Image (tube, grey):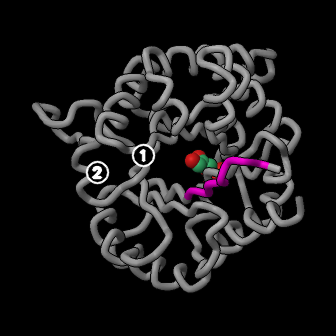
Amino acid sequence: MKMRKPIVVANWKMHKLVAEARDYVRRFRPLVEGLDRVEIVLAPPFTALAPLAEELKGSQIKLAAQDTWHEAQGAYTGEVSALMLRELGCRYVIIGHSERREHCKESDELINLKLKGAFAYDLIPILCVGERLEERQAGKTVAVLEGQLRADLAGLAKGDVARLVIAYEPVWAIGTGETASPEDANEGAKFIRALVADLYDEATAQSVRIQYGGSVRPENIAALMAQEEIDGALVGGASLDPVVFAEIVRRAQGGEEER
Ligand code: 13P
């Protein structure tokens, strides 16, 4: 029996204009009405955050941004701070997604600063870590995860880490239709939790929620959620359709019932 409340997040990435985002929420809300044993979070592009905050009034569904900057304000052209995201009603923020690590050359040092910036304004980060295909093939999965986490979490307070969400997203499973097997996903999550226990303590490790991400669909969510160490999912492509994502949420919650 898991003590942690599962969290399922829709990462829309760079998809949906404001009108499409509003339409999605109008269709999605009734489909997940009353589902409250799973935390449901939508992460639209920045441009849709304010309109969705309005659409989601009175609903249990929470909002996340897909990135943030580490300072609250200043001469950082093009960036958006945690303070600003908080003002819009965000509760969560994705940090260190592999697409940002790759395309925007984000380093673990920057990700570490962003985590601190998010916590400073009471946003809960969803920190993404994961190995690339060549790293996995070279047997370096654990070393990669350890290197990322040690650098990303450096200097973070225990109380903050306890509230953190960590998404284990093997890069080779993102957008490829190839999912890690539930056992492999669980092994990754288990390693992450053990490392948090090592860096902090067992109680902190037990309170961190660890998601799996990478080609999650309605067909594979139940088997992933049935794993001991997996507390939810970070869903890309399959979250773009409200009916499909609602089904993922429903099955994620159903998985809890079966235990
Ligand atoms: P897909 O679900 O499209 O594989 O994307 C996963 C992901 O990157 C979520 O952040």
- Looking at the picture, which amino acid does disc 2 mark? Leu
- Residue 209 in percent (x, y) is at 63, 42
Q: State whether residue 139 is above or below residue 74.
A: above
Q: Is residue 174 visible?
A: yes
Give the residue furthest to the front.
203
The picture quadrant where one finds residue 121 is top left
Query: Quick check: marks 1 and 2 in contact, CB under 8 Å?
Result: yes
**Which stretch appears magenta?**
2-9
Classify residue 55 as left or right of residue 206.
left
Q: Nearer the viewer, residue 41 or 258?
A: 258
Q: Nearer the viewer, residue 68 or 99?
A: 68
| SS class, disc 1 | strand
Label annotation for residue 93 = 1
- Does the beta carbon at disc 2 come under 8 Å from ligand 1? no
Residue at (54% x, 79% y) in the render? 28
- Residue 87 in percent (x, y) is at 23, 55
Give the residue furthest to the left.
75
Classify residue 135 as left or right of residue 237.
right
The picture quadrant where one finds residue 50 is bottom left
Kindly report the secondary structure that dominates the magenta region of the rendered protein: loop
Residue at (44% x, 21% y) in the render? 156
Quick one: label 2, few (<14), some, or many (20+) residues within 10 Å? many
- Residue 48 in percent (x, y) is at 33, 65
- Looking at the picture, which amino acid does disc 1 mark? Val
| SS class, disc 2 | helix
Residue at (38% x, 43% y) in the render? 67
The picture quadrant where one finds residue 143 is top right
Classify residue 178 as left or right of residue 63.
right
- Residue 109 in percent (x, y) is at 41, 17
Residue at (59% x, 73% y) in the render? 241
Question: Where is mark 2, residue-wise?
Answer: 85
